[in-house]
Amino acid sequence: MPLIDSLIDALRVLPGVGPKSAQRMAYHLLQRDRPGATRLAETLAGALRDVRHCERCNSFTEAPVCERCLSPQRDPTQLCVVEMPSDLMVMESTLAYKGLYYVLMGKLSPLDGIGPRELGFERVMARATDGVVTEVILATNFTNEGEATAHYLGEMLRARGLKVSRIARGVPVGGELEHTDLGTVAQAFTERRGW
Amino acid sequence: MPLIDSLIDALRVLPGVGPKSAQRMAYHLLQRDRPGATRLAETLAGALRDVRHCERCNSFTEAPVCERCLSPQRDPTQLCVVEMPSDLMVMESTLAYKGLYYVLMGKLSPLDGIGPRELGFERVMARATDGVVTEVILATNFTNEGEATAHYLGEMLRARGLKVSRIARGVPVGGELEHTDLGTVAQAFTERRGW
């Protein structure tokens, strides 16, 4: 196979990239942006070699333990469980949370063969029962799979005597009831707070 | 910058990839498909090192002259000019053409600073006036830029006494007039053939 076709083929490992986009990407890389292409090849090779999972939070890092987990500024008694590093970044950008994290790197997904073992629930338990953590905040998504993940983990954590909480569902800040889906409004009603 | 962020950043050189998709791609490569990611890094580095432009048709190849240009099965008196290698592949898959190609690797685009010099029109002229080519078929796209490219090149080629043709515009095969845009129908009328 000509090398250009191998490249088009190799680009299809990228999620959401079909034959047409792969072709367009290959031409762009070789014809329009060789410096960028070189940087991509080198950074990808470097990341494959050096990026690992933090021993404490399981997120991506180059060190055995990431900077965030080592920071003395964070409250080590709170542990927030999220699905992906992108969810961690969202939590961080709210500036509302000062504790530590555990990143599952996925969610329970029986159809894809991802169960508690594959997600490493025993590692979450080990992390949460370090004797310092007092509250585990479940911040998985409110999708079916995210909810199942939170439910399962919550049960396990409570069984160990840990305080477990779940981030709140409800009408978005600035949101109007008229433009919010019924399930969310119903949930916001059920989970109403004293005022 | 953490290596994972460098990777997300590097992925943004790909056309059509914004911050969100770049993040999704980086996680996928490192978390879900490391063999595919390794193949991508290696193939891209290999392509950057070895892929060059064919000395005759200007398309991508690893050899000085590509296999198609060397093939004794092709009719060397016909030269088809296309914008990109993907256009060449479309022409090839019609099985309607047995001549040779010249791939411009772009089109006239004054706003992007791409003029006749940048597109290497003098190389097209040199290729077309090899003494063997008798007809040049202009198969650039029917966009404004593709039309301008065909027009400009056609003028230059005719000035050298070469026979020049342009692939036909018209109602698509299987197309209904009612569902064809008016410009195309008008063109199909103007360029009607004796029957």
Image (cartoon, coloured by chain):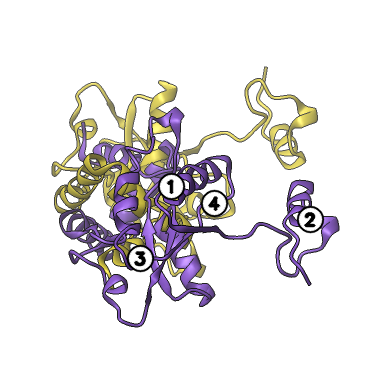
Chain colours: A yellow, B purple
> Camera-side residue: A156 or A161?
A156
Q: What mark, if any, has residue A9 been given in the picture?
A: 3
Q: CA distance from mark 2 to mark 1?
A: 29 Å
Of labels 4 and 3, the one closer to you: 4
How far apart, in angstroms, are the residues tagged by discs 2 and 3?
Answer: 42 Å
Judging from the image, mark 4 belongs to the subunit labelled B
Task: Tell if the residue under mark 4 belongs to the same chain as the one under mark 2.
Answer: yes
CB atoms of marks 4 and 3 within 8 Å? no
| Chain letter for mark 2 | B
Tell me the residue at 80%/29% (across/down): A178
Mark 4 or 1: the one toward you: 1
As helix, strand or loop, the secondary structure at mark 1 comes to: helix
For residue A15, side relative to residue A174 (left or right): left
Query: Disc number at residue B189?
Result: 2
Tag 3, which chain? Answer: A
| SS for dot 3 | helix
Q: Which residue is mark 1?
A: B159
Q: Nearer the viewer, mark 2 or mark 3?
A: 2
**Residue A133, image x, y percentages:** 30, 36
